[in-house]
Amino acid sequence: MRQFDLSRHCGAPLACWNRRQSIAKRHERNCTLRSKGRVLVALAVGSVALTYPVEGADATASVNSCQAKMSSTFLQPSWDMASWDAVRWDRELAYMEGVGIRTVILQWSVDMDANLAYYADPPTWYPRGADIVGSLMSAAARRGTSVWLGLGNVYTWQAHAGDQNWLYNQLYVNARTADHLYALYPGQFRGWYISNEVDDSLLATAANVGPMTWFFSALTDYLHTHDGGLAVSGSVTYSGLNQSTEQFSHSVSRVLGSLDVLHVQDGGGSGYIEATDIRNWFSALAPALAATGTALWHDADMYASPSGPMDPARLQTNLNATCGLVRGHSGFSFTTQMSPAGIGQWSHYLAYKRYVWTGR
């Protein structure tokens, strides 16, 4: 995948490089070397108060008594979504409320592959696409829905995970995007979502670990000290099964332990991962992340292999697999796999709604 050209967006390349380096240098002053060539996770950020949604009962309930429910969902920008009017946005959020989902996590605000910003960005930044962020924020304000905003997304970023220069560029884009979004919506959303999602294949590649640790630590440090000092979240998945559960947990806590919230994709939609597998690796993740202070969330696949919405009974079984191990449950993705407006039928929505309100 092509490398993002900073010179198009902030004038002369040297000026861009200097701005980009200043971000890195501020981070380096707050870091120390763990060992030669490896950067330690950024030091704690002063007195910044961080908040994130918590499913109170879920964090302490026993496996037998817990009834896991999604309280948040990811929202992935799409061409279809770009055409939604206010009525459709309100309808989608109302459907979510009906099953207890009161938080939306927008996966990205800039599609770096399509070279489009989905918000009212400055004319010197990316070409402006549909204002998905603005529409979401307006609907959320009307309905009292909480929002976390994603930053810049490159679909095949994993190919660059070990490339320090490429990650410098990605850090610059994410930092500037956050500056723009907070200037537009100060105090109106809960936190940030880093769109660069990690998998166990990346974590199992030694050359990627140092650069990725630096990237997530540096970006989290920037977001903690700028633009409202909001909480920072990210995502990881274990679906490749490239490490043991212990190795995976150690790698996750090292590379992503600077985040405030980590959504772990359960892989249930892959067709080969069962609820027992999900509980197995979450059981290893929970104590590993507890040591970092990162809140562990279960991000449930709502789709089934090879395609289409997951059977409601299986979704419920997968959600309950992590009872007592996580701070909450999110899902990918309500609008495409459960919403009556999105999938054109009511059966999945009504089945899950019955489970949420009756436990059956």
Image (cartoon, grey):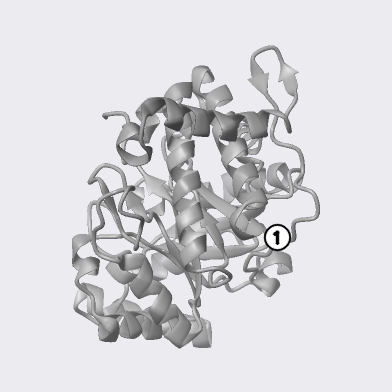
Residue in the picture at 24% in, 59% down = 129
Viewer-side residue, 29 vs 248: 29
Viewer-side residue, 269 vs 121: 121
Q: Quadrant of residue 137?
A: bottom left
Q: Is residue 9 left or right of residue 83?
A: right
Viewer-side residue, 90 vs 265: 90
The amino acid marked with disc number 1 is Leu
Question: Tag 1: Cα neighbours inside 10 Å, few (<14), some, or many (≥20)?
Answer: few
The N terminus sits in image quarter: top left
Residue in the picture at 43% in, 48% down = 195
Q: At which x and y percent is residue 231?
A: 63, 57
Q: At which x and y percent is residue 199?
A: 45, 37
Q: At which x and y percent is residue 59?
A: 70, 65
Secondary structure of the residue carrying tag 1 is loop
User: Could you tell me if residue 280 is visible in this image?
Assistant: yes
Query: Is 283 drawn above or below residue 167 in the view shown?
Result: below
Q: Is residue 301 left or right of residue 186?
A: left
Q: Quadrant of residue 292?
A: top right
User: Could you tell me if residue 266 is visible in this image?
Assistant: no
Residue in the picture at 49% in, 69% down = 185
Residue placed under numbered mark 1 in the picture: 50
Q: Quadrant of residue 58?
A: bottom right
